[in-house]
């Protein structure tokens, strides 16, 4: 078998290939970031709604208050750290802080890159509390705000006194 030793790219062919690839990447990169921002927005809504349902169920099942609070280390409550994540736990002594003898139900790491997440409750409380008697968030109704730093629409997740969720797309945060 005889191989031609001159089978290779020329410098011009290589330059044209690199140029075409760089143009394609330049055009595709904004769409990629738009896609990732949309995915993050959807993920935030799903995480919040799933964990609110979990907290309501666990409050009734365990006959104990359940708290959802923001966290930085996935172990302790920390105010205004919703961008990092949140925890759901049984609050047997009703102090809205996780203690050694209290059960950690769920931990969620959000690590947001395309937006910011904040909770604004009606009583200015920094956490959500679901009551042991009925699983309702008495005194913890309010809204989560996901404020996008990209071109994706903001989302407001509103929780009623009964723990039902609905969404709005505010024009600004």
Image (spheres, rainbow, N blue to C red):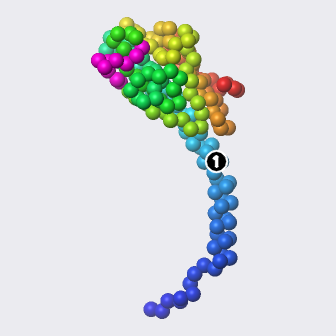
Instruction: Count the numbered circles shown.
Output: 1
**Mark 1 = which residue?**
31
- Give the residue displayed 50% in from the left and 21% down from the top: 79
Determine crowd level at label 1: few under 14, some 14-19, many 20+ residues with C-alpha closer than 10 A.
Answer: few
Query: Which element is circle 1 on?
Result: helix
Residue 74 falls in which quadrant of the image?
top left
Magenta segment, which residues? Answer: 96-105
Whether residue 65 is in magenta: the answer is no
Q: Nearer the viewer, residue 160 or 73?
A: 73
Q: Position of residue 106 (x, y in %)?
A: 38, 27
Relative to 25, is 163 above or below?
A: above
Left or right relative to 123: residue 66? left
The image quadrant where one finds the C terminus is: top right
- Give the residue displayed 64% in from the left and 63% down from the top: 21
Q: Position of residue 125 (x, y in %)?
A: 52, 13
Residue 20 falls in which quadrant of the image?
bottom right
Q: Residue furthest left?
A: 101
């Amino acid at each position: 078998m005889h191989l031609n030793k001159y089978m290779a790219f020329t410098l011009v062919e290589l330059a044209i290939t690199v140029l075409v690839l760089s143009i394609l990447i330049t055009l595709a990169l904004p769409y990629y970031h738009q896609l990732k921002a949309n995915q993050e927005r959807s993920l935030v809504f799903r995480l919040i709604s799933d964990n609110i349902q979990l907290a309501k169920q666990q409050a009734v099942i365990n006959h104990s208050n359940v708290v959802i609070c923001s966290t930085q280390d996935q172990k302790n409550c920390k105010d205004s750290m919703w961008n990092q994540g949140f925890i759901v736990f049984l609050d047997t002594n009703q102090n809205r802080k996780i203690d050694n003898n209290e059960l950690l139900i769920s931990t969620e790491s959000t690590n947001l890159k395309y937006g910011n997440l904040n909770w604004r409750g009606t009583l200015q409380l920094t956490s959500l509390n679901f009551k042991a008697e009925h699983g309702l968030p008495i005194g913890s109704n309010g809204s989560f705000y996901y404020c996008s730093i990209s071109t994706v629409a903001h989302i407001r997740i509103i929780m009623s006194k009964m723990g039902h969720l609905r969404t709005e797309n505010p024009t600004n945060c």
